[in-house]
Image (spheres, rainbow, N blue to C red):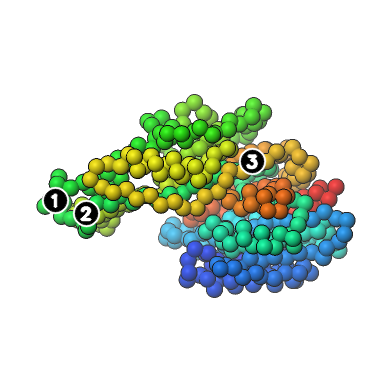
Amino acid sequence: MRTPIDDLFEFLRFPSVSTEPAHQRDVAACADWLVRKFHSMGLAAETHATPGHPIVVARSAAQPGKRTVLIYGHYDVQPVDPVAEWTHPPFEPVVVDGRIFARGSTDNKGQILAHILGVEATLQESGELPVNVIFVVEGEEEIGSNNLEPFLKAHSAELVCDAVAISDTGMIAPGYPTFTYGLRGITALEVRVKGPATDLHSGNFGGAVANPATALARLVATLHDADGRVAVEGFYDDVALPADWELEAWKKLPVQDADFLALTGAPELFGEAGFSTLERLWSRPTVEVNGIGGGFQGEGSKTVIPREAFVKLTCRLVPHQDPEKIESLVRRHLESHAPRGVKVVVEGGHYAQPFLVDPLTPFGMAAQRALHRTFGEIPAMIREGGSIPITRVFTEVLNAPVLMLGLADPDCRAHAPDENLPVANFENGIRLNQLLLEELAK
């Protein structure tokens, strides 16, 4: 007899890496698999072509008088590099010590499939659903969801709903029910420091021209003070502080600094002075270096002055910061602090607004009741430090509240080698979907 794990393993075997052109057919094949799965459950389903990867839409037969819940997820996954650091091949899922190891197990195939199988289980048990259900499952979340917003706007009349449910977030502690009501926004930049027209012999020219790698190091060092505070003028002007009830609630959560330290493997925690770890993660903005390079990268020595060096930056933002304004402030800072002898070129990248909702609305409380019934604990109410760009678009285009119910453990290793999802979380996710739809119907 086929089991939910069998379905998940089949789903996970598709190398649906959206950012790599070599996997374009794999992404499309994964979308087709989803459509067949929805059809097998009795739902109407189709793929919608986009300039990138397809969007899969499925829906139950509409029953007048019932609320409609839209469930969002994504079937694309991150690249697997460095593949040598995987204990098991990333697209050959295995269960070890109660955890499913595979790329996409947590982010997001395991989480969205739990919702799909929850709907299937309810239909098998009852023959009908307590609400009307629409699934929107995209193939471009890992590359910014650029085609989803235009799709939602073009099809908004067909996607009218009362609430949007998303499981693409995490739990505050292993197995601990968690309702996420806030996400940080993001703005990305890439900076290139250009010097000579070509790499130069560091003996023949060293000391006579500016070294772009050295200049870049000096430039990046101007972004923060010694205590980790961002040194960009105006960066904190619009920051909204968390409410008193949030700070009190965060103090009671079942995590300590030692837990974060163990999770990261860093020698010690470090961040903006005067704030707790959770405040730094959830309610304070940051500027982070995501990648830096230039010059010779191979083994041994090659004595050159590189022609250019680069750094990739992202700023995580909090209410009420505006991504475009922050990009402008950081750009101005970088250009005004450019060292002599080099040219600094700043290019903007993707961005998303911060997201914050009231967790105590009727729909928010329904979601928390479903979490409580599933896991047997009062849910933690948290913000998260990451960004899901499309959440705000759902609220603006469909005018529906977004409910974020994560199934990922803190050590899920999403985006890293050995990504994993506890079998218990997957199975609880199926039950959570059933109870969520039941609660939202009330």
Front in this rendered view, residue 299 or 179: 179
Q: Residue under circle 1?
A: 205
**Labelled disc at residue 196:** 2
Q: Earlier in the sequence, mark 2 or mark 3?
A: 2
Q: Are marks 2 and 1 in contact (CB under 8 Å)?
A: yes
Gap in angstroms between the C-alphas marked 2 and 3: 47 Å
The crowd level at tag 2 (other Cα within 10 Å; few <14, some 14-19, many 20+) is some
Gap in angstroms between the C-alphas marked 3 and 1: 54 Å
Q: Position of residue 67 (x, y in %)?
A: 82, 54
Q: Earlier in the sequence, mark 2 or mark 1?
A: 2
Q: Residue under circle 3?
A: 356
Q: Secondary structure at mark 1?
A: helix
The crowd level at tag 3 (other Cα within 10 Å; few <14, some 14-19, many 20+) is some
Residue at 74 percent across and 71 percent down: it is 39
Q: Could you tell whether 283 is left or right of 124 in the image?
A: left
On the question of residue 372 being in view, the answer is no
Q: Could you tell whether 295 is left or right of 93 in the image?
A: left
